[in-house]
Image (tube, helix red, strand yellow):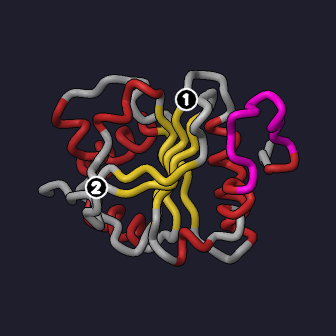
């Protein structure tokens, strides 16, 4: 089922900045290559909202890919074994928006974690993360929507580095 913003219950997440969410639906953050960080506890609607933003981006004609981080790591490992990792990374770099869901829910070895960290200089990212993972995110600037927190919907400056480092292949 496609999850849209019309199906999202803002009343259950009253701390969420609804005007900012509606602003993000316009997709200007994608044109600016900015990123969105959806953080909160499990079951708060992060995946629903990331899907709705992805669906909206598709409606705007943007190329979008959605992965759970576990799914992405498995696909990267398969592509590396099949000697198709470079080709796959090039395909990812052609996307306007990459949605990485459930970052930080499943621990990975350092080798697997390095596979997830790649450069997509023409892409924006949406990350969904538990609150405890925020410190482990790459140094970047995000539009931050924190579920269940009174300061939800502010810009979170983690740093100003423009891209995530690409793994050695």
Where in the figure is residue 165, as x and y percent of width and height? 21, 58
Relative depth, front residue between 113 and 169: 113
Where in the figure is residue 120, as x and y percent of width and height? 35, 66
Comparing marks 1 and 2, which lies closer to the viewer?
2
- Tell whether 130 sits left or right of 88: right
First of labels 1, 2 by sequence position: 1
Query: Residue 12 got which mark?
Result: none
- Tell whether 56 sits left or right of 64: right
Q: Range of the magenta residues?
A: 7-19
Where in the figure is residue 100, as x and y percent of width and height? 48, 46
Answer above or below: position of 118 versus 33: above
Callout count: 2
Residue that carries the numbered disc 1 in the rendered image? 40
Instruction: Identify which residue is drawn at 63% across, 47% down.
Output: 50
Q: CA distance from mark 1 to mark 2?
A: 21 Å
Instruction: Identify which residue is drawn at 32% across, 56% down.
Output: 140
Provide the secondary structure element on which disc 2 rests.
loop
- Tell whether 136 sits left or right of 10: left
Provide the secondary structure element on which disc 1 rests.
loop
Instruction: Identify which residue is drawn at 69% across, 46% down.
Output: 17
Residue that carries the numbered disc 2 in the rendered image? 159
* Image quadrant in which the C terminus is located: bottom left
Mark 1 surroundings within 10 Å by alpha-carbon count, few (fewer than 14), some (14 through 19), many (20 or more): many
Query: What is the quadrant of residue 107 in the picture?
Result: top left
Answer above or below: position of 75 versus 41: below
Residue 40 included in the magenta stretch of the image: no
Residue at the extreme left: 168
């Amino acid at each position: 089922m496609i999850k849209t913003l019309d199906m999202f219950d803002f009343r259950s997440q009253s701390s969420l900045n609804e005007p900012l969410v509606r602003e993000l639906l316009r997709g200007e953050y994608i044109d600016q290559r900015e990123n969105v960080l959806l953080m909160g506890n499990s079951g708060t609607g992060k995946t629903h909202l990331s899907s709705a933003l992805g669906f909206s981006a598709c409606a705007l004609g943007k190329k979008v890919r959605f992965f759970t981080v576990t799914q992405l790591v498995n696909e990267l490992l398969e592509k590396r074994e099949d000697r198709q990792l470079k080709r796959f990374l090039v395909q990812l770099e052609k996307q306007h928006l990459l949605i990485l869901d459930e970052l930080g829910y499943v621990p990975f070895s350092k080798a697997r974690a390095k596979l997830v960290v790649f450069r997509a200089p023409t892409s924006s990212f949406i990350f969904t993360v538990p609150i405890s993972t925020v410190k482990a995110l790459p140094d970047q600037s995000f539009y931050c929507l924190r579920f269940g927190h009174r300061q939800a919907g502010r810009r979170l400056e983690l740093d100003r580095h423009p891209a995530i480092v690409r793994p050695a292949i």
